[in-house]
Amino acid sequence: MSMLTIPETAALLRSFDNVLILTHVRPDGDTVGSAAALCAGLRALGKTAYLLPNPGLTDTTAPFFRPYAAPEGFCPERVVSTDIASTALFPENAKPYIDRVDLAIDHHPSFEGFGKASYVRPSAAATGEILYDVLAALGPITAEMALPLYVAVATDCGCFAYGNTTAHTHAVAAALLRTGIDFHAVNKTFFRTKTKKRLALEAAMLGGIEYHDRERTAVLAVPLSLISQVGAAETDAEDLSALGGQIEGVDCAVTMRELRPDVWKFSLRTGPRINATRACALLGGGGHAAAAGCTVEAPFQEAKRRMLEAIAQVAPDFTL
């Protein structure tokens, strides 16, 4: 695998045609926005490009994905992944392409090095921030590219509130706004609207919160029984991991969501005291220093214990 520069990445993409773009499981705004923008950029060059359908789309991300979804039977010559750190994050229908990824574009420090070529920049707040640089090297950034890019960048940095936000992040956002996109609608949809079912989920999570580590670590659980009780859809459960980090005095928020019976998806949001990637890596996961995840197959109490012990291993002053 070769690690490319931005000009080399742009040149490689310019040489591609009949491209299929992959997004990760439980797709968020960054993977969807990055993929959609890249697809629009390739089409602006006269290329044939599509996104591999992703069954995990939510009501908020689907509108940005649908215009680019591949028709049944599309046979790609080239395959590109966006915002995927590991082949374990490939949706089921993407797994046949694991050994066919020609280019991987990502921003996770835990990127596993798959793909024949890659461009990875862990300092970027979002893969969309990288895609902006790549697409700018290919030609003018149109509003069609800018809107999903804004979704990608804004969602992965919490509307520019998270610690991963940099001056370059703001510069990219400003350039995207200058194309005339309706960023107000994006902000309203992703950051200022909650369904009643979402509010019910949050109320139950906060009602059952557990504190550890001298109340610096909070554990919030989302069991299948709660999802069923509330009648929540996937859209209602987007980005629940942001909730715990808003609690005063908490610098390690652990959100554990039950995907299947006794299969728990952990999301960690941490301050500088605890490296989230190092903790999650002990359980087979990865991500960023302040935001990472992993999946543990065990009953609730056992899964929680494993995660707290992993956090304790990377935070010497942690107390259970």
Image: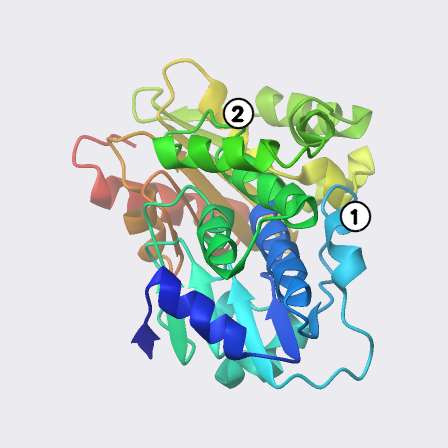
Depicted 206 relative to depicted 252: above or below: above
Q: Position of residue 199 (x, y in %)?
A: 72, 23
Residue type for callout 2 = Ile
* Pick the front one: 165 or 93: 165
Q: Are marks 1 and 2 in contact (CB under 8 Å)?
A: no
Q: Is residue 115 left or right of residue 16?
A: left
Q: Please name the residue shown 31% across and 77% down the image.
A: 2
Task: Tell me, yes or no, if residue 111 can be seen here.
Answer: no
Q: Position of residue 146 (x, y in %)?
A: 62, 44
* Pick the front one: 107 or 232: 107
Task: Tell me, yes or no, if residue 55 can be seen here.
Answer: yes
Residue type for callout 1 = Pro
Q: Position of residue 171 (x, y in %)?
A: 44, 33
Instruction: Say whether disc 1 or disc 2 marks the residue closer to the N-terminus.
Output: 1
Q: Position of residue 211 (x, y in %)?
A: 42, 24
Q: Which residue is tagged 1?
A: 63
Measured Cα–Cα span from mark 1 to mark 2: 34 Å
